[in-house]
Amino acid sequence: MRPCIMMGKNRLVFLIFIFLLRITSFFVGAILDPIDFLALQSIRKSLDDLPGSNYFASWDFTSDPCNFAGVYCDGDKVIALNLGDPRAGSPGLTGRLDPAIGKLSSLAEFTVVPGRIIGPLPQTLSQLTSLRFLAVSRNFISGEIPATLGQLRGLQTLDLSFNQLSGSIPWSVGALPSLSNVILCHNRLSGPVPPFVSQTLTRLDLKHNDLSGSLLPNSLPPSLEYLSLSWNRFTGPVDRVLIRLNRLNYLDLSLNQFTGCIPGNIFSFPITNLQLQRNMFYGTVLPFEQVAIPTVDLSYNRLSGQISPLFSNVQNLYLNNNRFMGQVPGSLVDRLLSSQIQILYLQHNYLTGIEINPTAAIPLSSSLCLQYNCMVPPVQTPCPLKAGKQKTRPTDQCIEWKGKPKN
């Protein structure tokens, strides 16, 4: 009988507390749900202002919590919680994220400004079934991304960038049907990328991690507009993936180990910045039409064949450190001399000639680098330091590559 008596006493204490909380709320004007009230108290106890921050100054629990900085209510429920002062230069918060966050049952938005919050993401985040926007970036969050986030079927934005997260990206996250933005860059994530099924996903940023493996043909939805996978260890071909992503306006696959050919139709996408440098792409590069992308970087690959004149409208063209052969198209020279091309880097290839007057004045706003090809550069222009000091490729190398280059 004693355990039952104790349980009865605990329940009585809780009911008295709720009654007193309601009375207090009546006099101070607060109408917040008691469970949300207690959750905010726990969250506050686990966090502090960094020196110079004054975010928690308004968190006085004798007043209405719905008037606290960063707390937004609908009726008696907290629907948004923005922890920290969002103004630029604010030093942010320190401490840990308390599991009590999961008690805010109506929370639709949860953000944390840059600071020094440590520890893992609370597993209780999976209880926030109303959550649409989750952004905890630029802190020191560690551990793995909870697979239970896959229970947040309405989640639209997931931003956990610039932290110390490790482990793999849970496949349950990739299966979320309503995602529009996934930003997990600058962490320590490893393993393969799960298939993303959301047909509303427009932004996927996974750069600066340790992700690996190859991309499956249907792993990314055609709704993508922004894709950055740079600074990882991805391998394998991507042509069957890329040909489906014709809405891309930004693509960065640089600093990986991707192989295979670059599909010609990608140069017709509405892209403003195409970054494919420092991979293992090979073969000829044949755009389907005149390329209108302002910046195209295909440097440090194994691309071969002739340089297409369809690149003449590109403002910044990096084709250096490949295996291109033959003449530099005259249309590229004309555009360079008229200041339409700002950067034309062709060094470290097997090019055999360029039609340009040795006395031609290269516009001060333009840069041309031709060194270390199978010709003596007819004009001497400043090149990047990394291009080295040799002006011409050794003759024996040029003879070896006189025929069709090997992949």
Image (spheres, helix red, strand yellow):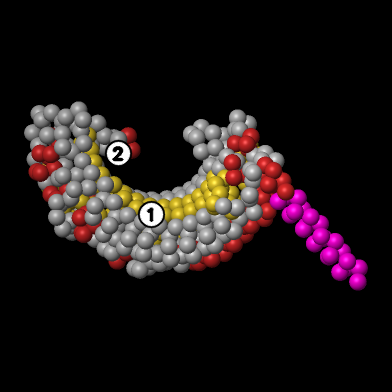
Q: Nearer the viewer, mark 1 or mark 2?
A: 1
Q: Main secondary structure of the magenta part?
A: helix
Q: Residue at x 91, y 68 (%)?
A: 2
Q: Quadrant of the N terminus?
A: bottom right
Residue 337 picture location, percent across and down? 12, 34
Is the Cβ of the residue at disc 1 closer than 8 Å to that at disc 2?
no
- Foreground pick, 193 / 133: 133
Position of 256 compared to 262: left or right? right
Residue type at mark 2 is Ala
The residue singled out by tag 2 in the image is 387
Mark 2 Cα shell of 10 Å, populated few (<14), some (14-19), many (≥20): some
Q: What span is colored magenta in the figure?
A: 1-22
Task: Check residue 286 for magenta coloring.
Answer: no
**Alpha-carbon span between mark 1 and mark 2:** 35 Å
Please give the name of the residue rendered at 59% of the width and 45% of the height, measured from the top-left corner: 66
Residue that mark 1 sits on: 203
The quadrant holding residue 197 is bottom left
Answer above or below: position of 150 versus 21. below
